[in-house]
Amino acid sequence: MIIKKRREVDEINSSSMADIAFLLLVFFLVTTTIDPGKGLTMILPPYDSDPSPRDADEIVKILVRSTGQVLLDKEVISIEQIEEKSKNKVQEFQSTHQGLGKDGKPKQPIFVVITDEKAQYQIFLRVLDQLKLAACKKISVVES
Amino acid sequence: MKITTKPRQKSTVSTASLPDIIFMLLIFFMVTTVMKTFDGLKVQDPSAKKIEKLENRKNVIYIWQTKDGSVCVDDQTLSNIDNVSEILKFKLESSVDPGKMVVQFKSDQNTTMELIQQVHTECRQANALKLSYAAKKLSD
């Protein structure tokens, strides 16, 4: 005769679940960082620095008018064109000014951004953005 | 009459629901916590393509500027823009590594350049030379 044993219900030991939850909590507490924000970076010159005189052919002037019109070397252009134009200017400059600069890299022209007092910040930033996209190293902003 | 006493069962408190309680607490705090950051002044960010993320929140000083010229540094609202350099100087001096400090500048896209230039000058006076113009990503 076969006697069937009554099967006991197995229980999963879940006491370590609490530890896992705590561990997750601690992990996320430690690793979460709050987004500090993003933007276009610029390095300003020190306040008491005296701008050394430059040759006129070293400078590329960019004018921003109060109407939002942008002029590159006295030529009216749209903002999207600045990237290409300034790339050309850099190449042009480097072909006429052979040799390396003080930092051991090819010489770079200086892009001077002159803005009207009433010009909009948005336009100025777009111009700056275009110059950065064109990998211009020397950007100068004229203070009125 | 005989009184029969039942053999006492060994009783244990079930801890199976403890993780549920902890998860619930975790979720409760996750949902309810609001990071205490000063929202600053209400500005409409300009847009740009080549934007970079800032590295560490500890090394960032925030400046807000509205188009009517009111300025706010971190959580102080200033009546006069000339005070910006003093506050920046103080903040740089009290920071651990002044060379790494970045000024995140948030201004409205319609602000005139006249006001922007004033902030530039203030930053230069305070020797806070790393500037980041807050901008949102401009899609192509």
Image (cartoon, coloured by chain):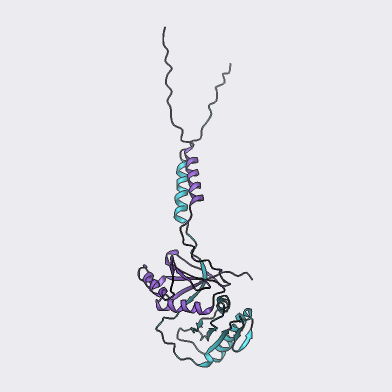
Chain colours: A cyan, B purple
- Up the image or down, B68 lies above or below A6; here it is below
Q: Residue at x 40, y 74 (%)?
A: B83
Q: Work out whether residue B53 or residue A1 is closer to the camera in this orientation and state it.
A: B53
Residue A22 placement (x, y as % from top left): 45, 46
Question: What quarter of the picture does the C terminus of chain B occupy?
Answer: bottom right
- Up the image or down, B19 lies above or below B74; here it is above
- Up the image or down, A29 lies above or below B119; here it is above
Q: Hey, which residue is sitting farthest top in the picture?
A: B1
Q: Work out whether residue B72 or residue A30 is closer to the camera in this orientation and state it.
A: B72
Could you say which quadrant of the image residue B125 lies in?
bottom left
Residue B15 placement (x, y as % from top left): 46, 35
Q: Residue at x 50, y 77 (%)?
A: B115
Q: Residue at x 45, y 53 (%)?
A: A29
Could you say which quadrant of the image residue A121 lies in?
bottom right
Residue B105 placement (x, y as % from top left): 49, 71
Could you say which quadrant of the image residue A76 lies in?
bottom right
Question: What quarter of the picture does the N terminus of chain B occupy?
Answer: top left
Q: Residue at x 54, y 92 (%)?
A: A57
Q: Work out whether residue B71 or residue A55 is closer to the camera in this orientation and state it.
A: B71
Residue B92 placement (x, y as % from top left): 38, 71
Q: How many marks?
A: 0
